[in-house]
Amino acid sequence: MKRIETDVIIIGGGATGCGTLRDLALRGIKAVLIEKNDIASGTTGRNHGLLHSGARYAVNDLESAMECIAENRILKKIARHCIEDTGGLFVTLPEDDPGYHQKLVEHCRYARIDCEEISIGKALRIEPNLNPAALSALRVPDGTIDPFRLVSSNVLDAQERGARIFTHTFVTAVIQEGSRVTGVRCHDTGTREDFEVYGQVVINASGVWGQRICALAGVELKMFPSKGAMVIIDYRINNVVVNRCRVPSDGDIIVPGDTVSLIGTTSKKIDYSQIEELSIDDSEIEVLLADGEKLIPNISRTRVLRAYSGVRPLIAVSGDVDGREISRGIVLIDHAARDGVEGFITIAGGKLMTYRLMAQMTTDLACKKLDSSRKCSTHREPLPGSELKSMPGKHIKFFSGIPQSVVGSTLYRHGERVRQILSLSKRNYALICECEMVCEGEVEYAIRHLNVKDLVDLRRRTRIGMGPCQGELCSYRAAGLFARLNVATSAESNGMLVDFLEERWKGMKPILWGDGLREAEFTHWIYQGLFGLGDVNLPGEEESL
Amino acid sequence: MIDLENISFDHCIKCTVCTIYCPVARVTHHFPGPKQSGPDTERLRIKNPELLDDSLRYCTNCKRCEIACPSNVKIADIIQSSKWKYFKKKFRIRDYFLSHTDLMGSVAVNYATLVNFFTGLPPVKFLLDAVFLIPSKRTFPKYARGTFRKWFRKYAQKKQAAFGTRVTYFHGCFVNYNDHSLGKDLVTVLNAMNIGVDITRERCCGVPLIANGYIGKARKNARYNIASLQKAVVDPGSRIVTTSSSCAFALKYEYANLLEMDNSSIFNQLNYITRFIYDQFQAGNAPPMKPVTIRAAYHSPCHLERMGGVIHTIDVLRRVPGLELQILHSECCGIAGTYGFKKEYYDVSQKVGGALFKRIERVRPDFVITDCETCKWQIEMSTPYKVLHPVNILARAFER
């Protein structure tokens, strides 16, 4: 069996795991990351992409709020191309408790979150689609963050500094020598090979799946999964984050995310056995749309693209109620101290916003175990692509000849790296995804440099298939590119295409009405009727006559 | 800021049929087609107006995409409004002169002979090409001497009082400054049908202004025209007719959809002329016609297609005895108003029209018939045939 030696092994390719990988790489420590699916495919990529100002937590959880605002300021510097500094509003609607507004102002002040009381007129100027019946409005430094880009940039930087990553690879066993964890045994689902990785420290950063990893190491850890559902609106209906000024509840936020807007979220306790197969109930969608409409009335006239849900990785520390009252604070466990298992660390809880802080805390602990005195620099070092303040005009001029919408969109997604992606050859900027302006050059770059193994991975790196057509026009083109770039056989490309369409379909099913339904019907007609995808040979299938 | 009044892009299901029917996308790769320029990139422009593509300028606003769209997306409207909402306003003297047709016309008619002589001179054309980027290959429409209004007041107005039924005629700039004969023929035709003609105060309908981004001026003209015309049609039975399909299209649809003006007070009473005549014929007001023994090819203009008015023209023409009518396959002629007068688009314009010109030559007609004045210029310049208006034909049929 293949054997890899390293210093630190990280299990889990979410924001925390990948952030830790980068932190270690920046400190010159060798590290390997194992992810069972794709980076940011779990909870990290299944939230509403809000760059919290902390105001949302200010009343209930001051500690989280202060962590948020501190990280908010750091991320705005180091992750420019993953972030939009849109600003956010907290609006009180007529049916809400007007007292919460004042409470929020006071708590924000205490947490040092810039919070400005503004008139409704001004709020409507900032966000013209806001419900004009709102009673009061607060302005906070909320923003948006793209988790896929954030995680991918962390990995890119780590890899360029020598770290290694294995995606689509399961941890099948935790190797122990006495009371010491010394490595992990893995199974690569792509190559179907087993291999072992040895290191001095194993970090369990697998979020809600951490319970299983702990069980493999013979340690008990009880996770408390809480499901949150969101719906995506066809286009960017609001340009600033709109929060409902009330005690946190379902459907109280609308976040503009790149070209779309998201209504979030619900909160529902689920059984641990359900975390792999999340479903969305009609009731959740009804609540989200009804409450979303209260904040932005025009939502009722807009197409819903899809619905999805994620699992909050909360650790049950005390008597839990419904998942919302529990602190979303960071839980860092040194299993040597807690369970007598050396060389094993679990990092859990927290949130996307605090991924960097969590990575820093974890890496500090790992360094202690490795006797390294290197200091963290992730709060200073910009992520690849975020080195300079984005200046679209400069790049559009540089790439004159390529449509502005393509240059602008690529720049938005990859920051300064756009220079390594686009070129003036016609093939390079031929469009693959017409909704999100993803060109062939970007697809090739992602496949070559961003750990893309299939179409679903490609979507997370480029937004392919995330627009209104949900993969209708781009997926077959992109699948063809995998074959042309010699990273997959044509049968494998077909397999990817089927998987991708199934994955898109899953998110459309709960919202199939109106234009979304028409679009889905048309997609079905193309792939089933025109291409006969149901009859195409997939890898491993017998040649049919 | 998101203007939610026009969110029709939200209904696009990316079937791309609009791009198949786009005459510009067919001839140049510089224009990615209406789907991408309209609904696709509108989402991006809502996110960030900087993502505006220069290629939008290639759209001729022919509206064939909207006819093709099965989802009722106002594709051309989205593109036009993006053009004037997001492009930086740059003053171009050429565009100013091309679009301000009534200003140009009212001056030129006084010196028509001189103007026509000079605009036909090769050195002048060369100069216009070099300095103003007006292609030297383009033939200029001739100006008439004096205005149609003047002629009407002097020779026709008095007789109209004799008719019990009268309609208001929106003559448009072309009849007023370039070709009085069409207006005169209209008076002949309607009088023959025992209907009198009135004119009222009017300004350019706004089509060239919209195309060149003078939206403020277009709105001003629209407001003026709506106010003037609604005075003429206080009685619900009264009617307004135009002999220009593009004027009719602008007054009815561009005002409401693109300029967001309330034209409901004139909407139902205003029609393109053949629709009005068709209704009269249907109602039994069909005086006997003399045979007009010519062989003609009929070209349907884009904006008349968009209004669904082609059937009326064809039906009316088919009633003319002796007229041998060949209906050409519906294609854009390429001129698109002022588009073909711009050097940067001249080649595209001629390529777009190429298919139509070939079809015309294959028919070898005596005349070409079309409803639109700019189509007429384009076809007369690009083929050896003279182009007539359906009203010209009817006037011959009704001649006493």
Image (cartoon, rainbow, N blue to C red):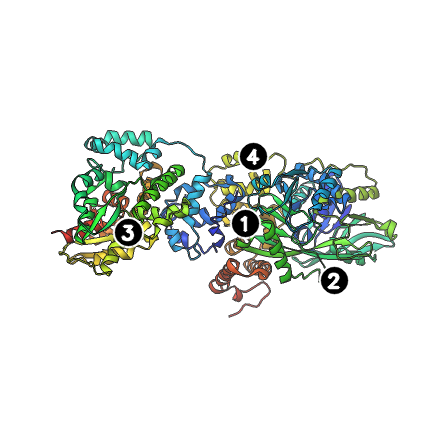
**What amino acid type should be assigned to the residue bearing mark 1?**
Tyr
Asked if the residue at tag 1 contacts the one at tag 4, i.e. Cβ–Cβ closer than 8 Å, the answer is no
Q: Which residue is mark 3?
A: B238
**Image mark 3: chain:** B
Q: Residues within 10 Å of mark 4 (few under 14, many from 20)?
A: few
Residue that numbered label 2 is attached to: A271
Number of marks drawn: 4
Q: Residue A281: where, in percent of width, then height?
A: 64, 62
Between disc 2 and disc 4, the foreground one is: 2
Q: Amino acid at mark 4?
A: Met
Find the distance from the CA under tag 1 to the CA under tag 2: 34 Å
Q: Please identify, in this view, whether the residue under mark 3 or under mark 1 is nearer the observer.
A: 3
Q: Which residue is mark 1?
A: A235
Q: Are marks 4 and 3 on the same chain?
A: no
Question: Residue A16 location, x and y as percent?
Answer: 72, 47
Left or right of residue B23, residue A35 in this image: right
- In the picture, residue A543 is in which quadrant? bottom right
Q: Nearer the viewer, mark 4 or mark 3?
A: 3
Q: Do marks 1 and 2 share a chain?
A: yes
Marked residue nearer the N-terminal end (4 or 1)? 1
Furthest-left residue in this view? B400
Measured in 3D between alpha carbons, the distance from the residue under mark 2 to the one under mark 4, in whole angstroms, is: 47 Å
Q: Dot 3 lies on which element?
A: loop
Q: Which mark is residue A391?
A: 4
Of residues A384 and A268, the one nearer the viewer is A268
Sequence-first disc among 1 and 2: 1
Q: Nearer the viewer, residue B156 or A283?
A: B156
Q: Is residue B205 above or below residue A516?
A: above
